[in-house]
Image (cartoon, rainbow, N blue to C red):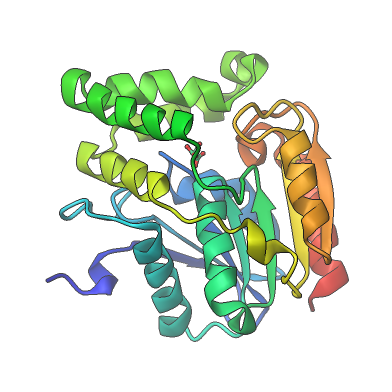
Amino acid sequence: MKSRKESNSIYKHGNPLATPIVFIHGFPYDHNMWDKQISFLQNSYFCISYDIRGLGNSPAGDGQFTMESFVDDLEEIIDELKLDKPVLCGLSMGGYIVLRAVERIEGQLGGLILCDTKSEADTNEVKLKRAAGIKKINDEGVQKFVEDFVPTCFTEESIRSLTEYKETLARSLKSDPIGVKGCLLAMQGRTDTTSYLSKIKIPALVLCGEEDKLSPPSSMKSMSEKINSAEFVVIPDAAHMTQIENPEAVNKAFLSFLKRNFV
Ligand code: MLT
């Protein structure tokens, strides 16, 4: 059996003595989606990103992932790097990992940044979409799945004009089908973390793209209202991939939250 160290590629930037921030990417992407935030914050914070199992440079293995195993990986990264009260920052599937991690180990965390995500488990309709996605990968290949899915995460303007859109799509097209299917099953089987939101005590920033159709601003606003400590920010000119589509606005919101709450 492979050790955890062989399961996740981990990337570190900045001063290890500064406040740690762990960046957790969405599906079906990789750690590169945080490049603009990390280059902006690395002079003041210890920035850690990693590839979730089966995506980016992290091997898929047998693809038998669960949301719990994703949180186990995160906990082990926190332990291995001896991170003291890290801020967890997750987008979409990364946010599902953050929300379950806070339920499991809030006492070990410093704060939360939840981008374009949700606390509810999959509805029946979404479960069926995941199953259809797996069938599409089996029948037509992972590239067809990625080509159909990735554009739903961006605004039409981002698709037309952003080089980063093309780069992100090109990286996702190289995904291992076993890893992508494993992530779909892990998301499909995740628990609902809504009941814990009102118990969260650590500082939280909830951020959402104005045109996000996968986790729309109205549902993210209502999630943020359940967290006593949360501030809510809507990012203009962005859909689901806020940090790539409008990095300036995202960086500004991150920095102002971090400066207010951490050294
Ligand atoms: C993501 O961006 O991580 C995915 O859209 C999450 C999902 O499919 O639920």
For the image, the number of numbered tags is 0
Q: Quadrant of the N terminus?
A: bottom left
Q: Position of residue 226 (x, y in %)?
A: 78, 57
Between 56 and 180, which is closer to the camera in this rendering?
A: 180
Using residue 257 as the reference point, say whether residue 195 is left or right of it.
Answer: left
Kindly identify the residue that appears in the image at 27 percent across and 31 percent down: 134
Residue 124 in view, yes or no: yes
Using residue 188 as the reference point, say whether residue 44 is left or right of it.
Answer: right
Between 3 and 245, which is closer to the camera in this rendering?
A: 3
Kindly identify the residue that appears in the image at 63 percent across and 21 percent down: 158
Q: Quadrant of the C terminus?
A: bottom right
Q: Is residue 105 above or below residue 235?
A: below
Between 52 and 96, which is closer to the camera in this rendering?
A: 96
Q: Position of residue 57 (x, y in %)?
A: 30, 52
Give the residue furthest to the front: 124
Kindly identify the residue that appears in the image at 70 percent across and 62 percent down: 197
Between 225 and 140, which is closer to the camera in this rendering?
A: 225
Give the residue furthest to the left: 1
Residue 25 in view, yes or no: no
Q: Position of residue 82 (x, y in %)?
A: 49, 86
The quadrant holding residue 68 is bottom left
The quadrant holding residue 138 is top left
Q: Position of residue 173 (x, y in %)?
A: 32, 29
Kindly identify the residue that appears in the image at 49 percent across and 41 percent down: 122
Using residue 205 as the reference point, say whether residue 142 is left or right of it.
Answer: left
